[in-house]
Image: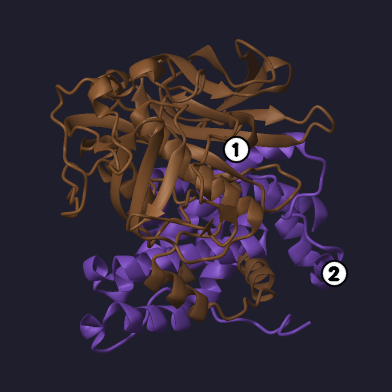
Chain colours: A purple, B brown
Amino acid sequence: MRRLFVAQPAVVYEECVTHESSWDADEALTAVYTAHYTSLVRLGALLLRDTGAAEEIVQDAFVAMHGRWNRLRDPHKALAYLRTAVVNRCRSRQRHLVVVDKHTPKSLPDEPSAEQAVLRTAETDRVIEAMRTLPEKQRTVMVLRYYGDLSEAEIADTMGISRGSVKSHAARASKSLRQLLEQTV
Amino acid sequence: MSDKQNDPFDELMRRALHEEADRIEPSDALPEIRARAHAQRPAARRPWLMTAGLAAVGTAAAIGAFTMLNGADDTANDGDEVAGPGTTVTATGAPQSQAPSVLPASPEPSAAPTQPPSTSPSAMTAGPTDRGVTEPPVKSAVVPVYWLGQQVGAREKSAVRLYRTWAKVSGRPAEQAVRIMTSKQPNDPDYYSVWRGAALNTVTRSDGVVTVDFKELPKATLDSKLARLATQQLVYTVQGALQDNQTPVQVTQAGRSVQKLFGQVDASAPLGRAQAAEVQALVWIDSPTEDQAVEPKLTVQGVAAAYEATVNYQVTNLKTRETRKSFANTKEGQKFSSYSFQLTLSPGPWQLSVYLVSPEDGRVTDTDTKSILVK
């Protein structure tokens, strides 16, 4: 029940660091990890509903970031890179699951455990269930918008789609969600 | 989006997603990430990504570049229906990262003398004290390189299979293929090689045996299944480059025979090729390749060992979500055999998945997926 009812500050994907340009890859890794590892895993877990898979994906992204630090040279760029890598990998995993889902009896790792379900408030439960009905792109846009607090432009960059597409995905998702949630609110 | 704070819907969404997210407290992974970053070790297997870049297909014709090496084994290519040179394969060129144009072929002074390309197979029969002859260098060849990757729907977590990529090389094809296998990162992050850290010396051929001599061998001890598969990874790669499935592979270190590979596999005698059914991934797509731009009317080709010859597929338009599902048949069931089917797709990004389903319970057991762009 940790912190469940405590309002959390929005995750801000910006950071203020000094002297970062002189960091070597290890220093950058440690700094960016400390600032963002948890929120990136949470982002991945929201997209996948599978924390273990999210952790693996985020770890891979950090390994890749370390390898290309010489080109990134900037924690802001590094974060944008990580975010894009995590979102892309989560999305390709979801697409794969679309196939697997149809043929697998409900034993997927993205099923919440009974314990988790109990810990959720009814309100969150409704929202999460409603999110499940959205197509993958719409859901990704909504997660980046409301959990990541990203702007339209940042979402567009992260997903590699146009701002117009972000807008229309968000509009469609909001419409469906409002309808679904109003039925139960 | 702080300007929309007042909308109760936005508030609800923000609150619910944060609440959901905040329940997740990942454990510290920095030491592991650091270790992996420094070792540049491949990632842990994630089967759902297994698919991308599986078959970066090269010019089939180029593989025939040194058939002269084969002699009597000429007909045995990289596994009958295993999409070797004999199988129809679309030429799209190997991806850049897989195609090092210049890899230093650096035979040690002790290496066997290079035979000119005109040497006939009979002249390659080496004397008993000779370590054999190296293959002739070629300007350009496309060689298969095998990797390890996890089997998607396997019951055991550790079920690993061989997956193949193609690489364009110049120099001595088998040596280059082994160098890629031991030193490069495969295109697909889900493939890996436990041969990392091994340093190849030479690949030589003498009567009835191919000798792969290493300056250094991997020191890791693996579990016996993985060790066996990793050994086959080398055998398949070497034999694939030589287009010879028959001749066994002797592993040596600095010219001396090796007792155990990976602490498990007896390597004192030449190693034979394991049956494809035991080691090879059960389905893959050869064409189209990952991220390929294709015409609306396209033919999908690949290889599968499928129960009742049935290969299922699904294509999904990533924009419109339009989805089509059907199945195709391999030429023969139960064994590795080619399949192909035709699709007519509207322009846009599509995801193509080909998969096998367990006859027992309908689980997806094996899959390969390509993202393609229809022009």
Where residue A159 sits: x, y (%)? 42, 51
Q: Amino acid at mark 1?
A: Val
Please give the residue where the numbered disc 1 appears in the rendered image.
B279
Locate residue B46 relative to residue B307 in the image: left or right.
left
Locate residue B211 relative to residue B66 in the image: left or right.
right
The residue that appears at 74% across and 65% down in the rendered structure is A124
Snapshot quadrant of residue B283: top right
Please give the residue where the numbered disc 2 appears in the rendered image.
A115
Label 2: few (<14), some (14–19) or many (≥20) C-alpha neighbours in 10 Å: few
Where residue B38 sits: x, y (%)? 38, 73
Snapshot quadrant of residue B146: top left
Badge 1 marks a residue whose secondary structure is helix
**Res B347 seen here:** yes
Q: Is residue B140 above or below residue B258?
A: above
The residue that appears at 77% across and 36% down in the rendered structure is B363
Q: Return the mark for residue B239.
A: none
Where residue B8 sits: x, y (%)? 64, 65
Give the CA distance from mark 1 to mark 2: 40 Å
The residue that appears at 58% across and 67% down in the rendered structure is A55
Where residue B25 sits: x, y (%)? 65, 78
Which quadrant of the figure contains the C terminus of chain B?
top left
Q: Nearer the viewer, residue B106 or B49?
A: B106
Q: Nearer the viewer, mark 1 or mark 2?
A: 1
Badge 2 marks a residue whose secondary structure is helix
Label 1: chain?
Answer: B
Q: Amino acid at mark 2?
A: Glu
Locate residue A46 relative to residue B64 in the image: left or right.
right
Locate residue A109 relative to residue B13 in the image: left or right.
right
Q: Is residue A115 above or below residue B191?
A: below
